[in-house]
Amino acid sequence: MLRRQRQVRTQFQKLVDACLFAVSYWLAHLIRFHNPTLAVFGGPGQISDFPDYVWLLLIVMPVTPFLLELQGFYNRPLIPSRRRTAWQLFRGCALAVTILISVIFLTKEVTLARSVVILFGFISFCLILAKEELVRLEMETKAGQAQFKKRFILVGTSEDTARMKTQLPRSAPDGIEIVGQLNLNDTSVEQLVDLLHKHSANGVILSAKHTFFGQVEKAIQACELEGVEAWLLADFFNTQLSQTLLDDFYGRPMLIFRSTPEHSWQALAKEVFDLAAALVLLVVLLPLFLVVTLAIKLTSPGPVWFRQQRSGLNGRPFTMLKFRSMASDAEQRKHEFEALNEMDGPVFKVTDDPRITPIGRFLRRHSIDELPQLINVLRGEMSLVGPRPLPVDEVLRFDDFAHRRRLSVKPGMTCLWQVSGRNNVKNFKDWVRLDLEYIDNWSLWLDFKILFRTIPVVFSGTGAK
């Protein structure tokens, strides 16, 4: 079953279960209201009318399906084990009862008897279990199987179809029945049409990995005329990292192979957060900027800001801004200290670099020299969190093209390397590994965690030289 179909089925199940939980709550109140003798735990004999407690449905209806989802209730096969169903449902109902009792306790709603909540748990368990049993009975009939089971024909080379058949029991144990298979490299599309007619197939699953694309096109066109679905496996290229996505490019279907974070609401939120936070921080830190500017001017000759060409998104050069922490001729003297480089690979790092000014050493230790990069963030050239941008000449010296994947996202002011000891990480491959780990596991929450971890690192000066 396709993911979209599973999602529709799951959403429908959640809606039905939410309604059954609501009905159970109403029945529990009705039974207790007309039977005061059911009072337990010293509860009141008479309870208020149901309208006084309708507000609790705002908790019952959205929360209870979520609790079942936590138990894996909606990830079961189409015809699941009865034992597994009952156990997951019992745990979900028990959690719902516990939450309702907690809400009643916290809101001091003593007029709602505890027996109502206990009855609610019992009735909801019985109703949903009965619903599951009815669905099972329906699906075990021939009519039910005809409705939920889809008959498919596998199309591809013998190797491809054999691989698909071995994978189907693990990835799609329900909803799919393979009624035939065909190798289009050896047979005609007319034979595929004959198989469609013979088995009244609902669709065709095509593997184009070793099948001629012309034949695949004819097979899809035949399915169009027959009115059956054609599923084309997008596995004709071997990729190691990329995720395969289907999108629309001006009305034409497009397969996308992406090994970087997908464009999503999280990515949009990251951009908005970067701009807003950079603007606020620049305003708040303006007095500090003035103090640092004055300190640099009074302690060493030369400009206040240091400008350098760095490699940005996908290697595009941009001018990165920093407070100058070295002598004004530091770049011209760089070759004098190349023998002292402590980093392997193309990166240049020297502990206690003699070109650093006294005030520059303090600025570097607490990363104050990096603050002007907030302007780069406002320009859209950098992000608050991302791999640190390297000088253009260092990127050109990459000896492993895989290292360039760190350029696939915007560079940042802080990153996993920054919060992992900075200069204590001497191996460039470890640095790249941390950057790629960030890219492969990126989320907005990960950005926030790195930002929070950056604060104590900056104040303590951990790993900075």
Image (tube, grey):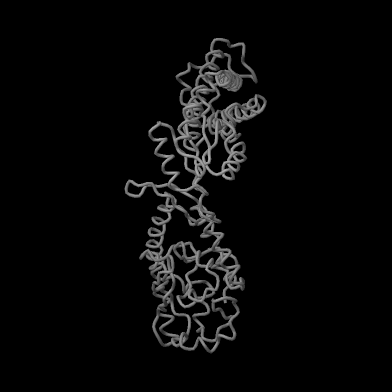
Quadrant of the frame with the C terminus: bottom right
Residue 50 appears in view: yes
Q: Quadrant of residue 159?
A: top right
Q: Quadrant of residue 171?
A: top right
User: Is 355 drawn above or below residue 346 in the view shown?
Assistant: below
User: Is 430 drawn above or below residue 187 in the view shown?
Assistant: below
Residue 405 image position (x, y, % from top left): 50, 64
Residue 113 appears in view: no
Q: Nearer the viewer, residue 115 or 448?
A: 448
Residue 179 image position (x, y, % from top left): 55, 30
Residue 331 image position (x, y, % from top left): 46, 85
Residue at 52% x, 18% y is: 143
Residue at 59% x, 84% y is: 340
Residue lying at the far right in this picture: please name it: 83
Residue at 50% x, 17% y is: 48
Residue at 54% x, 23% y is: 145
Q: Seen in the image, is 331 located left or right of residue 129?
A: left
Residue 274 image position (x, y, % from top left): 41, 59
Q: Seen in the image, is 63 located left or right of residue 282?
A: right
Q: Nearer the viewer, residue 29 or 156?
A: 156
Q: Nearer the viewer, residue 145 or 20?
A: 145
Q: Quadrant of residue 449?
A: bottom right
